[in-house]
Image: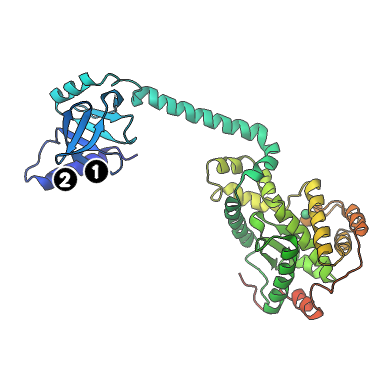
Amino acid sequence: MSEGSDVLNTVGEENAAAAPLPEAPAAVTYLDGLSNRRRPVGLRFGAACEIVEDDRVAASWPYADIRRADGPVGALRLMCVSAPLLARLEIRDAALAADLEQRCPSLNADLPGSKGVLAIVGWSLAALTSIVLMVLYVVPLAADRLTPLISQSMEQRIGEVADKQVRVIFNGKVCSNPDGVAAFERLMTTLRGAAGLGDLAEAAVIANSTANAIALPGGKIYVFKGLLDKADNVDELAGVLAHELGHVKNRDGLRNLIYNGGTSFLIGLLLGDVTGSSALIFATRELFQASHSRDAERSADKSTVEIMHRLGRSPQPMGEFLLRITGKEKAKALALISSHPLSEERLARMSEEHRWPTAPPLLSAEEWAALKNICSNGKAGR
Ligand SMILES: [Zn+2]
């Protein structure tokens, strides 16, 4: 707060500037609560206590609203409940102080030195207690309910931090072969359009051999080179991307982050410091191991079916693709796969939704070849 010795020092300097000789502090000084400057003023006792500065009434404090505030020895420091919170009047003239004190009926009501502080401490404790209780008993169930309460812009900020973290984890190895990037962008634009996601959901390929894909909070999608390498045609990859777009649409990345970030993430969220919290960094790492709930997976699969149908393509290749990667064992399951535990069940559903393509492939043969090559050609960019 702005009260304190620094303010008094300022007074001393002002006085020294105004008068050639060092002087005792002015008999009455006034801090308007808006600026940090303490000004010498006069007082006029009329219907209210008028604070007069340069023959102008700077403020008028009703007597009933005036309260005693903590002050230095030898001075009466006052505040006013109908004035700005930090406004203070300080009177060093004992007679004048006594005169004013007599006029103020509620001078000693709610002293900030005792009851006020206690009230603040009490409220803080209550708030803290409720946070702790929430964390202990509600968090495990809260992710679902909290997720819709987090604004898009907050999610974006969280996503940016998560994204930075991902790039640190993977050394910033984002594949940048220009022809590959162009093909990938074209595919993503088509898919985003069919998903109705506008320019949300940027995507990139990471030079990492894991067969994985992930949608971060805020909508950023990463496909790992290991997954791209194993894809035999555009529909297989497009189906996975459409699935991730489903996660974006359903904000599953954010939900997972809340769930995995657990207590400290939630406290950070409640205290408004999410993006700086180490919990977020931790939770981002966890994202790669985390699995979505079975419901979230089904819902994301539904999005694959819808998007592929809308584009005149079949969702079945994606089901085949993932089953081919996982095989039938679940033991050494990787993140995408462990988050997609039911590859056979999925393939069965995708096969039910199979329709013969009514539109040409989503990329030309050249574009697909370029996309497969996106990580080649020298340096990975950032
Ligand atoms: Zn998924």
Amino acid type of the residue tagged 2 in the rendering: Glu
Is residue 219 found left or right of 291 in the rendered image? left
Q: Is residue 334 visible?
A: no
- At 24% across and 36% down in the image, what residue appears? 59
Question: Residue 14 bears which disc, if any?
Answer: 2
Q: Is residue 378 above or below residue 336?
A: below
Label 2 sits on a secondary structure element that is helix
Q: Which residue is mark 1?
A: 37
In percent of the image, x 77 and y 74: which residue is there?
A: 372
Q: Do the numbered discs 2 and 1 sit on residues whose CB atoms are within 8 Å?
A: yes
Q: Between 326 and 321, which is closer to the camera in this rendering?
A: 321
Residue 201, located in which quarter of the rendered image? Answer: bottom right
Among numbered discs 2 and 1, the one appearing first in the sequence: 2
For badge 1, the amino acid type reads Arg
Give the left or right position of residue 293, taking residue 139 as reference.
right
Question: Left of 337 or right of it: where is 254?
Answer: left
- Up the image or down, 119 lies above or below 336; here it is above
Q: Could you tell me residue 122's position as x and y percent?
A: 47, 26
Residue 48 percent location from the top left of the image: 23, 27
